[in-house]
Image (cartoon, rainbow, N blue to C red):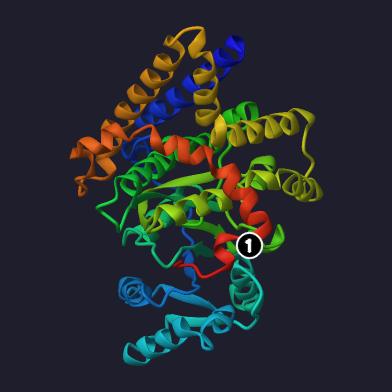
Amino acid sequence: MVLFYWILWVIFALSELSILWSLVFCTDRILEKRYSSDGDNKKEHKFVLMIPVFDEINYIEASFDYFKQFVEKGIHCVYITTEKESQLYGTCRTKEKLVELMKNNPSPFMHICHYPYSKGNKVDQLNYFISRNKGRTCDNDIYLVDLDCDSRPDLDIVYDMKRILKKYPDANVIQLNSRFWSVNKKSPILNLEAFYQTRWSFGFERLNQYFSTIPLINRVLVPFAYCVGHGMCIRATFLYRIGQFPQPLEDVPLGMMLMLMKEPIYPCVSKDLAEIVPTTKALLKQAGHWLRSPLQAMPMYRKARSLKHISTYRTIMYFARVALDILSWLQYLILLIVALFLLEVSPWYLVGYFVLLYITSILSLTLIRRYKRDDEWYESIWFFLLLPLRHFIRGLSIFSFIYQKYFGWFYDKRKNQ
């Protein structure tokens, strides 16, 4: 048991230190420097913002008003509604509200695509739009940007993406990293979750994406650089070639396939701003839903292998990365349980656990503040005291996953409940 504790403690410490190192190293300044020099690509790229929506009647007007700013710049924006909403309310309220808003604010760059089936999820909505518009978007210079209704990307994202493509014209995938905030400011747990999701975005995702763009590191370390739904930008022709978005989630499993194919993901300097779920109950359900992603490792491997030869070394590294990703969901809770079992041997095992957790969390908090300057949640003493709690909630994701496996998935039901 003691040996098991120290193995987990070392894995925990290394993963936390890598996140801290990323927050120090992989900054906006580094990316600015990487993309600043002029390239030879003179092509004019076009971007289509895709926003799949389901049960968003309470948020759609604010979303429309924000994305109207992109439309005014001549950027196409498509809301993809779903007939599934009619099953819940007898009518598709989100679509009706969008029609009303577009009637009052007509523009040739704002569109609605309605998914006409009552069964299906976000991936089905996206793939329906892509299939319906293949003739219009099957151009090597068109990029599709996957966003959510609560996304509030920086207004200069298109400029930033064009700058990347000017220097790296063969780039097929570009990714915005997200800052998160909680609409429920009075909830320390949800404010905590916003902090940790932002930390993960800039401490794990951005560094691995950056490493994927360096050929030698991509080949040797096989970085786990995956996409996320808030701001994933992908070349339309490349997406058609690999068979559209995978089920049951469009982002992380796709990133797993790109990892196998050695396809780089270029992180943007520009960012997205997104909300986390509004309640603790929804947070637990969301964690179980997200745990579905690493379980798609084998289907993504088979699909990638059908598209490209994959070496034995890359295969081994890929499954090792996936195993570590699954462990990252459970390691904090498992380590705590082991430390509690070892109380009879020595209380220092439990002390060592909390010391490491608090030190790495407080250092992360200090480094993350540059991305969340407008928030004041870090001034609360409760916020500091509850820092370990989020890791325990993440560990409970396995129970949420099992429950939803048999009683229905979070995003397949009423989203706002």
Above/below status of 220 relative to 95: above
Quadrant of the drawing holding the N terminus: top right
Q: Which residue is mark 1?
A: 408
Q: Is residue 10 above or below residue 221?
A: above
User: Relative to 382, is 219 on the left or the right?
Assistant: right
What is the x, y in percent for residue 45?
A: 48, 64
Residue type (three-letter) at the residue carrying disc 1: Gly
Of residue 295 and residue 139, the one placed in the foreground of this image is: 295
Most extreme residue toward the front, as rendered? 344
**Residue 101 in the figure: left or right of residue 217:** left
- Residue 128 seen from this side: yes
346, 108: nearer the viewer: 346
Residue 141 visible somewhere in the drawing: no
| Residue in the picture at 45% in, 64% down | 148
| Residue 185 versus residue 64 in the image, above or below | above
Is residue 216 depicted above or below 172 in this figure? above
User: Picture coordinates of residue 23 (x, y %)?
Assistant: 36, 32
Quarter of the view holding residue 27: top left
Dot 1 crowding, Cα within 10 Å, few <14, some 14–19, many 20+: few
Residue 258, position as x, y percentages in the image: 64, 46
Q: Under tag 1, what secondary structure?
A: loop
